[in-house]
Amino acid sequence: MARHHTLLASPLMTTLLFLLLTAEKLKLEPAQLEALRKASKAMCAASVANDAKALVDTFYPGAVKAMGGAEEALKTTAESMERSKNNPIKLVSADAADPHFCTRGKDGSLQCVLKQTNRYLHDGTRLVSTGDVVAFSPDKGATWTFLNASLQALDRLRKTFPELSPDLPISLQKPPAPER
């Protein structure tokens, strides 16, 4: 029994419990959720189609700025997509689930975490990878943009984008594995 008491009293557990109890978790209204679904479908479709322009149009403006502006973001994304054509692993589908957590950012924007699932084909083997995407809406859920949050170390991500709510439960992307 003392062992459980020690675990619950640890600083890590105390911090996690505090965050869970104080995090402002929001529920989206039906119109907000529908707008988010439509925007996430456009993001996923652009990824699968290797449409750099359409994909960059879905990027969170802070990410575009961090990439050096719209022109540089488009150039970098197009180059990455061109290089992926020579990769033996091909993205064949992508989809994003409804948000599992939404809150308000430090700037008042709506911020939600969605689990994105990518399916790949490699030498006849189907692979699957999941990771978190943060959706941002500066206008109460009418429009949404996205930040692939699970490819970077979380401390670096939060340093680059200080407007991210500290409440967002972001997990790192899982590497592609055979689909079951």
Image (cartoon, rainbow, N blue to C red):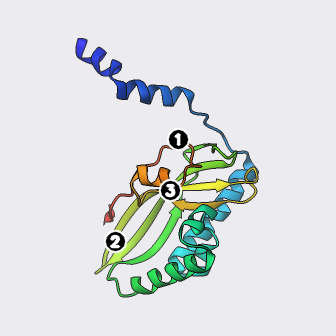
User: What residue is at 48 percent from the left and 26 percent from the top?
Assistant: 18
Q: Quadrant of residue 150?
A: bottom left
Residue 2 x %, y %: 24, 12
Q: Which residue is mark 1?
A: 166
**Quarter occupied by the N terminus:** top left
The answer to which of marks 1 and 2 sits earlier in the sequence is: 2
Residue 146 x %, y %: 59, 61
Left or right of 26, for residue 3: left
Left or right of 23, for residue 123: left
Q: Which residue is mark 3?
A: 160
Cα distance, mark 1 to mark 3?
Answer: 13 Å
Vertical placement of residue 10 versus 41, above or below: above
Circle 1 SS class: loop
**Quarter occupied by the C terminus:** bottom left
User: What residue is at 59 percent from the left and 49 percent from the top?
Assistant: 163
Q: Nearer the viewer, mark 1 or mark 3?
A: 3
State how many labels appear: 3
Q: Quadrant of residue 91?
A: bottom left
- Badge 3, how many Cα within 10 Å: few under 14, some, many 20+? few
Circle 3 SS class: helix
Vertical placement of residue 84 versus 14, above or below: below
Q: Which residue is mark 2?
A: 126
Question: Which residue is nearer to you in this view: 159 or 34?
Answer: 159
Residue 127 x %, y %: 34, 68
Cα distance, mark 3 to mark 2?
Answer: 34 Å
Instruction: Tell me whether circle 3 and circle 2 mark residues in contact (CB < 8 Å).
Output: no
Residue 136 x %, y %: 64, 55
Q: Amino acid at mark 3?
A: Thr
The answer to which of marks 3 and 2 sits earlier in the sequence is: 2
Left or right of 88, for residue 162: right
